[in-house]
Amino acid sequence: MLGFLLARAGIDVIVLEKHADFFRDFRGDTIHPSTLEVVHELGLLDEFLKVPHNEARHLEGQIGNETVHLADFKLVPTHCKFIALMPQWDFLNFMSEHAKRYPSYHLEVNAEVQDVIVENGRVTGVKVATPGGTREIRADLVVGADGRSSTVREKAGLEVVDMGAPIDVLWLRLSRRPSDPDMTFGRIDTGKILVMLNRGDYWQCAFVINKDGFAEKQTRGLDAFRAELAGLAPYLADRTGELKTWDDVKLLTVKVDRLKTWYRPGLLCIGDAAHAMSPVGGVGVNIAIQDAVAAANILTLQFWNGPFPDAPLAAVQRRREWPMKVTQGIQIFAQKRILARVLGSDEPMRPPLIARLFEIFPPLRAIPAYMVGVGFRPEHVHTPERIATAPR
């Protein structure tokens, strides 16, 4: 997104992708109203919504034997009043294809950043491994957007503050049938948590476990795990056999951390590279997009005026640090006070008071809808389209 916005403003950009494509099944696929609003501001929303996707207009959950309505997105002040459930590779392909219309946008795949180049205390580029060998790429600014295991932030020596996480997630898929529920669904029962994302012909499932608890699951055996899934969602009982081996279950190690300082001369980190988010709320992708929009708004004029100064890098952190900290604080609270307690409980589950209030007073569902769908300090596109695009 940042590459798109800078190229759109006439700034020469190289985007480096480690793999040959964007296909990674573990990537999040919830495109929230705040991100859809950015796509609208770019004039691409109508075309974007033609990409196959599902729409979650509300969020529901089953706690014990009771169904609760948690969020209603028709109450958020955005053009799209839903979460678009779209595989992230489709979202990235869409943005990249449109970015390629700008002659100043360059995408290089099979290009793995291995180190940063530092000269006189300033980052001046990166060393990249490619099929043709290692090469150096120089830049006025290097942006690390390479996720929670960021090579860029490690090689740049930026200090990471680990906030801790008591949970991990097992990621798996099971086929979906027309008779299944059609909504994005959460299920909480005695000691167990399952989230199911509707991807059309299959369910993408997130099974929450205690931190480092995967080995214990494996020791108990795959049949026991299949039984747990069927117990949480009985209509899946005849499909759990699709999990043939533990290779069909992927461990996602949950991290919640943040950089003390997101930048150094010549380098800026954004998204999970700057602040790894918990999966709680599924907001990580959308927080990263907000970082990108804010960075483009702040940095574009500096590139136009050149040579590039470092002062705006601190401005990006100042702009985005407060909403990041608030969001992480809520996630950490939910992990420790709700998820960890559920996983450690052997008592029957019942909806808490706040969930009951959502049932009694439906307008209250606007609060979690706004927190999840829009977030704190949503960003808007202020950068212009400075150069004409290439013909389609």
Image (spheres, grey):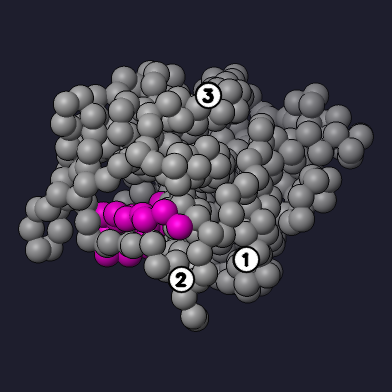
Q: How many marks?
A: 3
Q: Position of residue 35 (x, y in %)?
A: 61, 50
Q: Is residue 11 magenta?
A: yes
Residue 66 in sight: no
Q: Position of residue 264 (x, y in %)?
A: 32, 26
Q: Is residue 95 magenta?
A: no
Q: Which residues are magenta?
A: 10-26
Check whether the beta carbons of the residues at disc 1 and disc 3 lie within 8 A of each other.
no
Q: Nearer the viewer, residue 41 or 299?
A: 299
Amino acid type at circle 1 is: Leu
Q: Is residue 1 left or right of residue 244?
A: right
Q: Is residue 119 left or right of residue 170?
A: left
Check whether the beta carbons of the residues at disc 3 and disc 2 lie within 8 A of each other.
no
Q: Is residue 93 above or below residue 313?
A: below
Question: Which secondary structure lies at badge 1?
Answer: loop
Q: Nearer the viewer, residue 121 or 211?
A: 121
- The CA span between labels 1 and 3 is 29 Å
Provide the residue designation for mark 2: 101
Q: Position of residue 375 (x, y in %)?
A: 66, 36
Mark closer to the observer (2, 1)? 2
Mark nearer the N terminus (3 vs 2): 2
| Residue at left offset 49%, top offset 81% | 392
Check whether the beta carbons of the residues at disc 2 and disc 1 lie within 8 A of each other.
no
Provide the residue designation for mark 3: 318
Q: Is residue 154 above or below residue 22?
A: above
Residue 43 in sight: yes
Q: Residue furthest bottom?
A: 392
Q: Is residue 219 left or right of residue 174?
A: left
